[in-house]
Amino acid sequence: MQAVRPFARAICSRAGAPSGPFEGYLEVPFVKGEGKVIPDGVFRVSRAGNVWTALLEVKTGSGKLTKEQLENYLDVAKRHRYEVVLSVSNDIPASVGELPVQVNKTKLNKVSLRHISWSEIIHEARMVLSHGALTDSLQVWILSEFVRYLTHPKSGATEFVDMGRHWVAVRDSVTAGTLRASDVKALSVANTWASLSRHLALRMTADLGVTVKHHLPRKLINDPQARNEHIVEQLAATGCLAASLRIPDAAGDVSVEADLRTNKIQCSTTIDAPTDGTAFRRASWLLRQLKDAPADILVEAVFADVSEVSCENLATVRADTKSLTSGRISELRRFTLTSPSKMGSKRSGSAAGFIGSVTDGVDAFYRDVVQPLKPWVPSAPESSASPADLE
């Protein structure tokens, strides 16, 4: 962070720091009562004569943050009038602001407690490397080596690789049709799914250089319990885990659905049809944008009369565009494109793993289907006056 200042800025801004020169110190001892506490680090950012300070606590591997340790640091930070205690571990919060450990709320009156996962740190480093406009070759090398270190299996800093110990039991309950919305194990899986959804958004953010968000209904954004209960209700009713990713300037959101009953991952997006021309011309407009898309994706045409919805795979539509519109007389309103793929069953790891199958499915769908799509832009209105009239 001291060598690559844009990276330091990216990390400190997540903890609420102002923009300014960064200083970092390791294992600074503080007196607490009759003993000492030694945070893993101290961050300092200076701006306009003021100094913002954060205490850092780090866990790697299977190490877990503890309430007692964090509360000790909060006490020290309050006594020294520091602003933040920042924790780092492999716990990925399901949404921004969530904490893996709940502390006494009275400890947060003067000091903030923030958390960032190793996965997020890796994504921030990749974001700076790809889109941070680093001009110093030494900085590029240092940050690249840092990413290479973190992504090594023995570093103790892992990306999202495990659905948790209840995954197999919940998956089997869904398959057997015995899962109910009151299942406590399912709530744990729901929280992990929300974390995976955020992980997907972070990966795309680092890759694309724009902020991709895990889109949730407004009433669920700041209520983790209600969010998890909503996910479990959907899972019990449909056998599916679903998420929506909002990508700036993309033609549509990317919806991800993991169907545990059929072992299928389905990625989809919806795009409005042109507002002029025949249904055939509107379908042809879409087809031109899908010239490099996989032939097995499903193309659904939605008409004003919902009874006239049609769906064909892309190979069929390429061979005969009318197969999507023939016999329909109401206005063609929009298209939904869906790409099915096989779902991995294992709770962790990349080979035959559930997480890997979801990640690969989203990456391929965005690259092959969503990225080339452009929303319809109507032609500019034509003037009715002739050149002679204008003269």
Image (tube, rainbow, N blue to C red):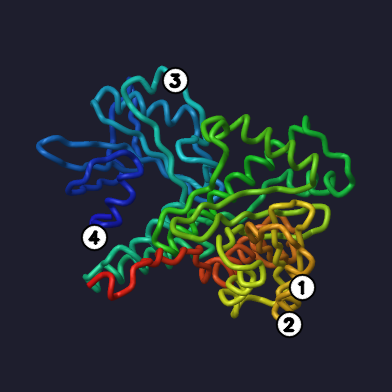
Q: Are marks 1 and 2 in contact (CB under 8 Å)?
A: yes
Q: Earlier in the sequence, mark 4 or mark 1?
A: 4
Inspect this view and state whether residue 349 appears.
no
Question: Measured along the vertical axis of the image, is residue 40 above or below residue 269?
Answer: above
Q: Residues within 10 Å of mark 1 (few under 14, many from 20)?
A: some
Instruction: Find the distance from the CA under tag 1 to the CA under tag 2.
Output: 9 Å
Q: Nearer the viewer's eye, disc 4 or disc 1?
A: 1
Q: Nearer the viewer's eye, disc 1 or disc 2?
A: 1
Question: Measured along the vertical axis of the image, is residue 318 above or below residue 49?
Answer: below
Q: Earlier in the sequence, mark 2 or mark 4?
A: 4
Instruction: Find the distance from the CA under tag 2 to the CA under tag 3.
Output: 63 Å
Looking at the rendered structure, the kind of residue marked 1 is Ser
Q: Which mark is residue 319?
A: 2
Depth check, front residue: 286 or 16: 286
Q: Residues within 10 Å of mark 3 (few under 14, many from 20)?
A: few
- Tell me which corner region of the image, top left, top right, bottom left or bottom right, holds residue 275: bottom right
Q: Is residue 335 left or right of residue 39?
A: right
Q: Is residue 212 left or right of residue 194?
A: left
- Does dot 1 land on a helix, a strand or a loop? helix
- Does dot 4 land on a helix, a strand or a loop? loop
Q: Residue furthest left?
A: 49
Q: Which mark is residue 3?
A: 4
